[in-house]
Image: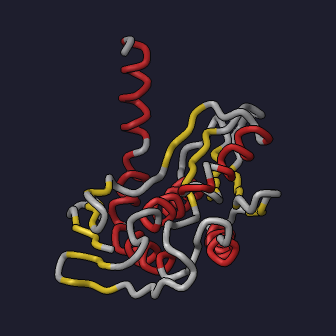
């Protein structure tokens, strides 16, 4: 890392102290959103119900969200200049078929249920990032675009993301908002806020 980049990174980190504090204070809200979205069925190819929920949540944060031809939800927080946006992505679909019973429950320090981590966590964090950006006191030079994509899992072959990046504005950078690493077939560890929690599906 060059000294110029290091200095810019340090200054940005310092300038966003209030926003970082806001994210820490929203730990519980992130978890509530994570549980709520995991209760909405979204097998690959049938993400519309979950997409509408995400669009409504982005709208509640003051962003105008729309669905593109592939069913992706797209919302933009404007920047000061007409440059390529920074893009924050999280996928909508899960590996679980429509008939899966989406029961989410707490078990001590664990949150247990199908899709609670992949990608309930990614979507919940993206929504809270949207709130933080909207409340940010500093003006952004570039727009920030929030994109909830379809068809990520399995045979979906990243359909929504491929469509977005092929047809949308070329981003200046991308931020993947995704679930924690899966450990085996049945469990994953999601760092929910400051205290890591084991999530089992």
- Asked which quadrant contains residue 115, the reply is bottom left
Quadrant holding the C terminus: bottom left
Residue drawn at the location 70% of the way across and 61% of the way down: 73
Left or right: residue 155 versus residue 9 is right
Frontmost residue, 16 versus 76? 76
Q: Is residue 193 visible?
A: no
- Asked which quadrant contains residue 44, the reply is bottom right
Frontmost residue, 199 versus 61? 199
Location of residue 83 with respect to 62 vertically, above or below? above
Q: How is the image coloured?
A: secondary structure
Quadrant holding the N terminus: top left
As drawn, which residue projects farthest toward the left? 108
Residue 107: percent from the left, percent from the top? 21, 83
Residue drawn at the location 29% of the way across and 77% of the way down: 111
Frontmost residue, 170 versus 105? 105
Left or right: residue 190 versus residue 121 is left
Q: How many marks?
A: 0
Residue 128: percent from the left, percent from the top? 49, 63
Residue 125: percent from the left, percent from the top? 46, 60
Q: Is residue 13 visible?
A: yes
Residue 72: percent from the left, percent from the top? 71, 59
Location of residue 34 with respect to 10 vertically, above or below? below
Residue drawn at the location 67% of the way across and 66% of the way down: 45
Residue drawn at the location 55% of the way across and 80% of the way down: 40
Left or right: residue 161 versus residue 137 is right
């Amino acid at each position: 890392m060059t000294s110029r980049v290091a200095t810019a990174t340090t200054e940005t980190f310092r300038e966003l102290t209030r926003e970082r504090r806001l994210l820490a204070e929203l730990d519980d809200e992130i978890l509530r959103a994570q549980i709520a979205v995991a209760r909405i069925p979204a097998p690959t190819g049938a993400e519309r119900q979950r997409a509408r929920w995400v669009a409504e949540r982005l709208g509640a944060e003051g962003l105008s969200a729309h669905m593109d031809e592939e069913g992706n939800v797209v919302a933009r927080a404007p920047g000061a200049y007409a440059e390529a946006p920074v893009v924050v992505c999280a996928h909508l679909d899960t590996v679980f078929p429509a008939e899966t019973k989406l029961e989410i429950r707490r078990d001590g320090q664990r949150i247990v249920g199908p899709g609670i981590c992949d990608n309930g966590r990614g979507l919940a964090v993206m929504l809270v990032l949207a709130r933080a950006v909207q409340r940010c006191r500093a003006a952004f030079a570039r727009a920030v675009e929030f994109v909830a994509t379809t068809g990520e899992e399995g045979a979906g072959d990243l359909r929504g993301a491929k469509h977005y990046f092929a047809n949308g504005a070329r981003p200046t950078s991308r931020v993947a908002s995704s679930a924690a690493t899966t450990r085996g077939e049945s469990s994953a560890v999601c760092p929910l806020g400051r205290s890591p929690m084991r999530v089992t599906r």
